[in-house]
């Protein structure tokens, strides 16, 4: 239905408008009795052998929905059943965090959800802590980065349950010195991982940290081969948004099946070599 009703219109739209159109479609689909069950059946997100532990959490597969689509936490369960192992809600400020929490109290999440916090960091993080599984924090001003992250980490210490905090890179963070400054802080202060925005950032983080920080590659990719390239570059998980909007749920399934096929082939080759 997406291919017939939505795809022809959104492919040439401005990304923000296209996302809003797609979100309305998924909202309508989720409101149909049995709609979520059918979506999970047709877009199964638990292929055998694709499970992985990242940040101490169990993911069904390496593909998640990145922030920018479910901006207020309205449709996380309707989107998760399309094949994603996690849904990143946001970008959030304090007001949007309160909105998302109200939804989560009324309709608890079926699977892993991440809060993407970009403003009112301390308030948003404190409010969200009990309701989300992990957190992606973006501080666009590098002059404030360490101060903001120190506050967030101090708040985490006040909770009995430990939840992962990852630092989200800005897409404009390209200077090697700035990247290393952020990574040095993360390595020294118990940050659980990094969310990168480009293939180049992913490679830089992997090379510098040598696997000591897990990576979510929240990068634009248009083919399953490009998704595999992100994993090969050092990412443990990849985030998708534009691919879902422009190509529909079948693209999610196509990517997961390609990654699954490659993982099986790699395992077979390793067995033969042994």
Image (spheres, rainbow, N blue to C red):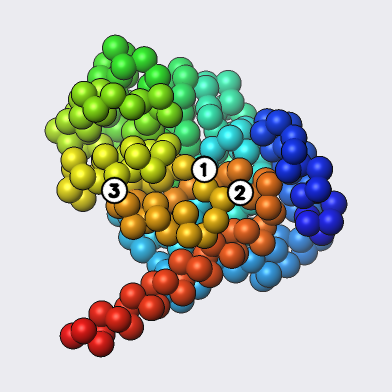
- Disc 2 from disc 3: Cα separation: 23 Å
The quarter of the displayed image where residue 148 is located: top left
Residue 117 sits above or below residue 248 on the image = above
SS under mark 3: strand
In front: label 1 or label 3 = 1
Q: Which residue is mark 1?
A: 220
Where residue 125 appears, as percent x and y from the top left, is 42, 28
Q: Are circles 1 and 2 on residues that touch, CB within 8 Å?
A: yes
Residue for point 17% across, 48% down? 210
Question: Which residue is depicted at the point 26% across and 39% down?
Answer: 204
Q: Residue at x 58, y 35 (%)?
A: 68
- Can residue 50 be seen? yes
- Tell me which residue sits at (58%, 44%) in the image: 241
Q: Residues within 10 Å of mark 3 (few under 14, many from 20)?
A: many
Is 73 on the left-hand or right-hand side of 62?
A: right
Q: Position of residue 174 (x, y in %)?
A: 33, 27
Circle nearer the N terminus (2, 3): 3
Residue nearest the viewer, comparing 188 with 197:
197
In the picture of the structure, the residue carrying the numbered disc 3 is: 214
Q: Position of residue 64 (x, y in %)?
A: 50, 52
Marked residue nearer the N-terminal end (1 or 2)? 1
Labelled disc at residue 243:
2
Relative to 185, 215 lies left or right? right
Mark 1 or mark 3: whose residue is earlier in sequence? 3
Report how far apart the C-alphas of labels 1 and 3 lie in the structure: 19 Å
Say if 175 sits above or below 270 in the image. Answer: above
- Asked where in the image residue 273 lies, by quadrant, the reply is bottom left
Q: Residue furthest left?
A: 188
Instruction: Name the element at disc 1.
Output: loop
The residue mark sitting in front, 2 or 3, is 2
Quadrant placement of the N terminus: bottom right
């Amino acid at each position: 239905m997406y291919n017939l009703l939505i795809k022809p219109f959104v492919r040439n739209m401005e990304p923000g408008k296209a996302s809003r159109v797609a979100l309305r479609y998924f909202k309508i689909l989720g409101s149909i009795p049995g709609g979520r069950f059918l979506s999970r059946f047709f877009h199964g997100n638990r292929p055998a052998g694709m499970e992985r532990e990242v940040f101490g959490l169990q993911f069904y597969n390496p593909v998640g929905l990145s922030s920018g689509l479910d901006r207020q936490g309205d449709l996380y369960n309707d989107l998760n059943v399309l094949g994603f192992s996690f849904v990143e809600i946001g970008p959030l400020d304090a007001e949007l965090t309160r909105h998302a929490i109200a939804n989560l109290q009324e309709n608890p999440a079926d699977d892993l959800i991440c809060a993407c916090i970009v403003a009112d960091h301390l308030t948003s993080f404190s409010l969200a802590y009990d309701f989300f599984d992990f957190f992606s924090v973006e501080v666009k001003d590098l002059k404030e980065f360490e101060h903001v992250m120190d506050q967030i980490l101090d708040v985490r210490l006040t909770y009995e349950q430990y939840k992962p905090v990852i630092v989200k890179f800005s897409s404009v963070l390209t200077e090697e010195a700035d990247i290393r400054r952020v990574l040095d802080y993360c390595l020294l202060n118990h940050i659980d991982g990094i969310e990168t925005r480009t293939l180049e950032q992913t490679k830089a983080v992997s090379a510098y940290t040598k696997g000591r920080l897990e990576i979510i590659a929240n990068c634009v990719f248009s083919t399953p081969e490009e998704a595999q390239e992100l994993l090969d570059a050092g990412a443990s998980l990849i985030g998708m948004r534009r691919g879902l909007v422009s190509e529909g749920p079948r693209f999610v399934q196509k990517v997961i099946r390609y990654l699954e096929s490659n993982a099986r082939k790699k395992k077979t080759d390793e067995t033969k070599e042994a």
